[in-house]
Image (cartoon, coloured by chain):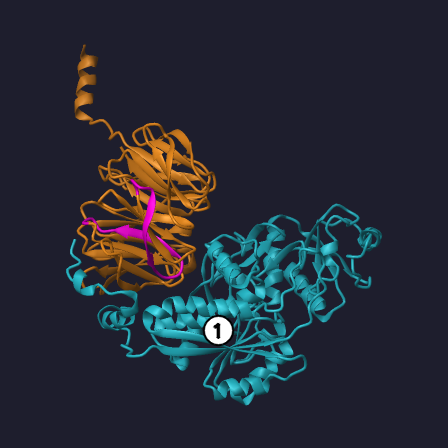
Chain colours: A orange, B cyan
Amino acid sequence: MQTLIALVLVAILVPPAAAETIYVSNEQDNTVAVVDGATMTLQAVIDVGRRPRGMALSVDKKSLFVAEGDDNRIDVVDLAKRQVVGQLPSGADPEFFVVHPDGKRLFVANENDNLVSVVNIAGAKIIGTVDVGVEPEGMAVSADGRAVACTSETTSMVHLIDAATLELIDNLLVDTRPRAAAFSVDGKQLWVSSEIRGTVTVFDTATRAQTGKVEFEVPGIRREGVQAVGIEMSRDGATAYVALGPANRIAEVDTKTFTVRRLYLVGQRPWHVALSDDQKQLISANGNSGDISFIDLENQEVAKSLPVGRGPWGVVIGP
Amino acid sequence: MAISNIQLGLLDLSQTRLALAFVGLLAIAVPAHAEPQTMVIGYLGEQRKLPLALWPLDEAVTDDGLQGARMGIADDAGTGRFLGQQFRLQERVLKPGEAPAEAVNAFAAAGITFVVADLNGAQLLQASSAPGAEQMTLFNSRDPDDGLRQEDCRRNVLHTIPSRAMLADALAQYLVWKRWQHWFLLTGPHPGDVAMAAAFRRAATRFGAQITIDKPWTFRPANGRVDTGHVTLQTEIPAATQVGDYDVLVVADEADEFGAYLEGRTALPRTVAGTQGLVATGWSAVDEEWGATQLQDRFHKQSGRWMLPSDYAAWLAVRSIGEAATRLHSLDPTAIAKYLRSDDFLLAGFKGQGLSFRPWDGQMRQPILIAGPRLLVSSSPQPGFLHQRTPLDTLGIDLEESTCKL
C-alpha cells in the first residue's frame, strides 16, 4: 500500500514528459526519422523523395512538408499515417522553405534558379516568384506574416520580401555565404548566419540597420573550422541557439549582449537545431555522425546521442 | 512584429539601387552612388594546341579558363546589382607565339588593373614585366609551376591555380592516410611531367611515403584509338610495369599521353594515382559537395560543358575581386589590391572553407580534391595533418621554406 501511495505521489509530482515527436530529414538516406521525444528512441523511418533537407509542419500540425532537392518537389507527410500522401511543386532544387502563418502558402528557396517560389498549398500550385541573389538558401518568416527573409549564399545578402505583394523590401549585405535566417520572436530583429566567416549578423527590422554581430570562438579550433549554420530562437526571446557546423558545437547566445554564454559539444557537423515545446530540450541534427544530440538545457549538458540515419540535416519538433 | 516603415520601403527591383543608396547610409555605410560604377577586369589567354583526345567521350575544349572568368563576372554581378557595382570582362586571346606585353599595355591604357592571366609560365613572366603591369595585379590561373611561386615570384602576381607542390602534397596525404606508402613513380618525358615527379618525390619525403620504384616512361606516345589499338597497349604496359612490389602506381603525365592507359593493364593489380586515375586537382566536374552542385550546374548551363580546373582558377580570380569589392563597398583598385592580400580576405569557393592568399608568395590557399573518373573520393588536407597556422598550409610551399622575395 505504501508503495502504491509512493507511486501515486511520484506520478503526481513528476509531470509526464511532453509527448513530443522529433522529425529528422536524412539527406543521404532519403528518409525522415521519427523519434519519440520522451523516451528518446527511434520510432519509425519514413521513405521520402531524394535529398530531403528543409522541413516544416503545417499550421494544424497534422502534416510535415519535406523539401526534396533532387526531385524538385515538396513531399507532404501525413503524421498520423507516417507516410507521404501528397506532393507540392516547389520550383527547381528546393533546399529550405517556410510555411507562412496564414497556413496557405509556402515560401521556397530555389537554389539553382535564384528565385523564391510561393506555393499555394491547397491548390498545389506555384502562385508567384521573387528574384533574389545567387543561390538562395535560408528562409524565415516574421510571426505576423508580413515579412519573409531569404539569404543568398554567393551574393552574401539577406533579401526582405513583402509577403503580401511579393516585392523586395530590402537587400542587406551580410558576411560571406549566409545560410540561415531567423526573426526574433517579437519580430524586431533579423538574425543571419554566415558559414564561411563563422558569424551571425543581427539587423533591426524597422531601420534595417545592423545592430549586432555574434562572433564564435571554439577553443582548439581554427577560424575556418567554425562555421555558423542553423539558428533557433527561444520563445522568451532571451536566447538564440546557433549550430557551428564542422566545429561540432551548438552555441547558446545571449540576445541582449550578442555574446556566447556556452558551447555544447554535439555530434559531427550539426546543421540545424530545434527546441522542444517546453523549451527545456534542444535537438541538433548532426550531418557527419549520422545522429541527433539531445541537449538538456536545464542541466546544461548533452543528455544523449541517437543514431537516426545517414546525413541528418533538418529537425522539426511536433506533437 | 514591427517593420514599421514596410510600406514606405516597398520598392520594385528597378528602384533597388536607389533604395540601396538610402539603406547604405543607414545600415551598411555604403557610399551612396548616384550612378553604378563599373569595374573592367582583363582576361588574357592564349591559343593552345588541342590535346590528343584519348577516348570518344572527351570533349574538345577551346575556351577553358575563359568560361570560368565569364561566370565569375556573372556571379560578381549578383551582388553588384544590389550595391551599384557593375563588372565587365575585357577578353584578349593571344595568337600562338604572340608576346603578351602589348596586350598588357593596352589593358593598362584602358584603365584595367586586374587581369586574369590564363598563360603559361614564360608568358606570365613576360606579362608581369610589361610596363603596363606595374600597377596591376595579375592572377595566374593556368600554370602550376612551383618556380613561379619561388625564385620567379612577382609582387604583382597572385596564383589561383594550385601549384604542383600543393597537388602532390594533397595526394601524398591521402595515400599515406590510406597507408599506401610504397609508391611506384612513373614519369613522362616532358618538362611538366618531370616537375610533377619532383613534386611527388618532395611530397613522399614530407609525409613519410617511400618511392620504391622510380622509372621514366620510355614508350613513344601512341594513339590508342586505332582499330585494335588495345593490343599494343596490352603488351607494352605490362612490360613497362614489370617491377618489384609496391602499393600504388603514381604517374606523372601532365600531357595525358599514357597515364590513362595504365589502369587495368599494369603487371600487378594496383591502383593508379597522380595525373590520371585517382587525381589531385583544384577542381573536378565530379564534385558536388559544399554546395558545388549549384556552381557546376550554373557553369554547365552557361558554357554547355563541365567546369575544368583552369575554369575554376579563373573563376576564383574574378570572384576574389568581386568579394573584395563587396566587403570594401568600393571599386577602388588600390584598396582592392591591398585587401586581397590582407588577413581579412576570405572567399567562398565551394570547398567547405574560406580561401585566402598566402602573403609570402601570393598563392591561394585551398583544399585540393582527390577525384576518381566518376566520383569524388576525398579532399585534402587529410585529418591528422596539422599546422601551426592553418591545415591548408600543409599543402604546398610553406612560409619557412619559401625562397620568394616579394
Expressed as whole percent of the image width and height from the top left, the position of residue A138 reads 34, 53
Residue B374 in view here = yes
Which of the 4 quarters of the picture holds residue B54?
bottom right
Q: Which amino acid, by three-letter code, is at mark 1?
A: Pro
Please tell me whether residue A214 belongs to the stretch shown in magenta. Answer: no
Position in image of residue A20 (x %, y %): 28, 32
Camera-nearest residue between A276 and A70: A70
Q: Which residue lies most toward the top here? A: A1
User: Is residue B89 rendered to the left or right of residue B145?
Assistant: left
Q: Is residue A238 left or right of residue A268?
A: left
In front of the other: A308 or B391: A308
Circle 1 residue: B359
Asked if A91 appears above or below B13 in the picture, the reply is above
Pinpoint residue A93: horizontal percent, then vertical percent. Answer: 42, 50
Identify the residue shown where x is 37% and y is 43%.
A314
Q: Residue at x 60, y 62 (%)?
A: B167
Disc 1 crowd, CA 10 A, few/some/many (<14, 14-19, 20+): some
Residue B85 spot, x, y in % from top left: 36, 74
Nearer to me, B248 or A9: B248
